Amino acid sequence: MRRLASRWMMVVLTGTALTVVASCDDTAAPAANGAAPGLSFERNAADFDVASGFTPLPSSAVCSVGGGLEQILLPSGFVETLVASEPSFPDNIDMNTVNETGAEPGRFLYRTHEIAPNAGVSVTDLETGETHIVARRNDWERFDGIVWTPWGTILAAEEVSPAGVRDPDFPDATAGLVYEINPQTGGVRARPAVGSKSHEGMRFDAQGNLYGISERAPGFIYKFVADRRGDLSSGQLYALRLVQDLGDRTGPAEWVALDRAQVQINADAAAEAVGATGYSRPEDVETGTSTGRDAHGNFLYVAVTGEDRVLAIDLSAGTNGQAFVSDYVRDGVNAPADFDLPDNLALDKEGNLFITEDPGGGAPSKTKGDDIWVTQPDPANPRQGLPVQRFASITDCQAEPTGIYFSKSGRTLFVDIQHRGGDGRDGAFGIQKISTVDFTPTAR
């Protein structure tokens, strides 16, 4: 395990003033009052409740290149906290998870690094602020998705197709692989049975099935069922296929079993062979079995970046493994025209779905920041959310929000800011609600 210097800083934004509350590194002395940094700030946060009402941001941030610690335009009553930043971890931070089970659940924030080669996973202790590398290898490429398993390990996955560097133990795999990492020891095992493809978001359901996607066209949606619960070394990979198209690839669907040997070489080819249904750049998936709650029961949400839509897949529809695909959020239906390229998803404890954008482009072509939206569940229609509201906007033209994920308590929305301008340092932030004042957006 390689150890890097780390630093921690908490910032509170009041109006346009940015205040550094505390900071530390590996050698810093304890706080004067004896309180640990990190999670201590969350204990004073209010419940992260948008359902009780907040004033959505009327427009995206007018962005600029670089800047200081201030990164995120938020409604009044919400603040951002810098949890960790470069150089305490490598470049291109992406998705997040915490230790959802086991001892001291929620204390450790893990993140992937979308570097090629030499990708890896780093962790920040939210009590002490210490950051270090958990695992990293020269043959790993563009780690993106990350998820905590129900049995207490981490899955991290490569977002590549074709692979630029083959795994020495599985050289026949033509694309990215999923790796299972022991968070205590850094021990690693490849899990090719989950499929060789361009992975991104991953999530388990209550039965222990693992869902994911392939970002590479034509963009399939997958489910993996292990032969033995808690053992991903063997199992059946399925791809989603519509039974009846009710319009633009929505309607009743089924999970089609794929050839077990072929998926370890090229899962997309296996899915194409059975006529699986494709979407343009599916990226993240979300279920209500982790740190959020699915207000509708047993749904899988999928961000389809290339089509400005978020799918809701009712996993309980029909029998014999059938499902039903609908548009939960869609540009021109319940989202405005500037709802661009939805990328990452996170459910809160009230069932509200948060969605980040990934328009890319960078300065000087961009004049507005990427946004974070939220849709509340529609009690009358579980297959479509209420009209989206703009919750946050990034103030750096070159930066992209990614990896949104709620803490175990539900009081912090973690988000990573990557590709920053200015000093170029990526940052991991926490967003919290601090009061019940009038939620009027703060002008900056």
Image: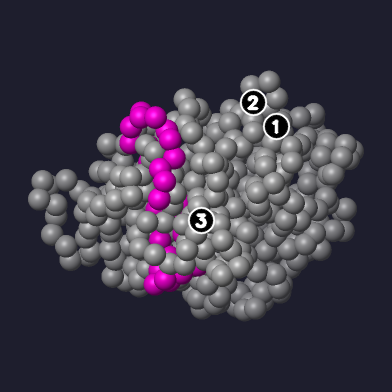
Point out the image quarter for the N terminus.
Answer: bottom left
Q: Between disc 3 and disc 2, whose residue precedes?
A: 3
Disc 3 and disc 2: Cα gap in Å? 31 Å
Q: Position of residue 352 (x, y in %)?
A: 55, 34
With respect to residue 278, does 52 lie above or below? above
Query: Dot 3: few (<14), some (14–19), or many (≥20) neighbours within 10 Å?
Result: some
As helix, strand or loop, the secondary structure at mark 3 comes to loop
Amino acid under label 3? Answer: Val
Q: Would you say 280 lies left or right of 287 here? A: right
Picture mark count: 3
Q: Is residue 366 left or right of residue 273?
A: left
The residue range painted magenta reads: 415-444
Badge 2 amino acid: Asp
Q: Nearer the viewer, residue 32 or 155?
A: 32
Labels 3 & 2 near each other (Cβ < 8 A): no
Element at badge 2?
Answer: loop
Residue type pointed to by label 1:
Gln
Q: Which residue is mark 2?
A: 378
Pointer 3 residue? 62
- Specify the quadrant of the image occupied by residue 23: bottom left
Task: Please say whether residue 181 is visible from this viewpoint.
Answer: no
Distance of mark 1 from mark 3, alpha carbons?
Answer: 30 Å
Q: Main secondary structure of the magenta part?
A: loop
Element carrying mark 1: loop
- For discs 3 and 2, the disc positioned in front in the rendered view: 3
Q: Locate residue 351: give its quadrant.
A: top right
Residue 148 horizontal/vertical position (percent) = 49, 49
Q: CA distance from mark 2 to mark 1?
A: 7 Å
- Numbered mark located on residue 384 in the image: 1
Query: Of residues 227 and 413, which is closer to you in this image?
Result: 413
Compared across the picture, whether 154 is left or right of 321 comes to left
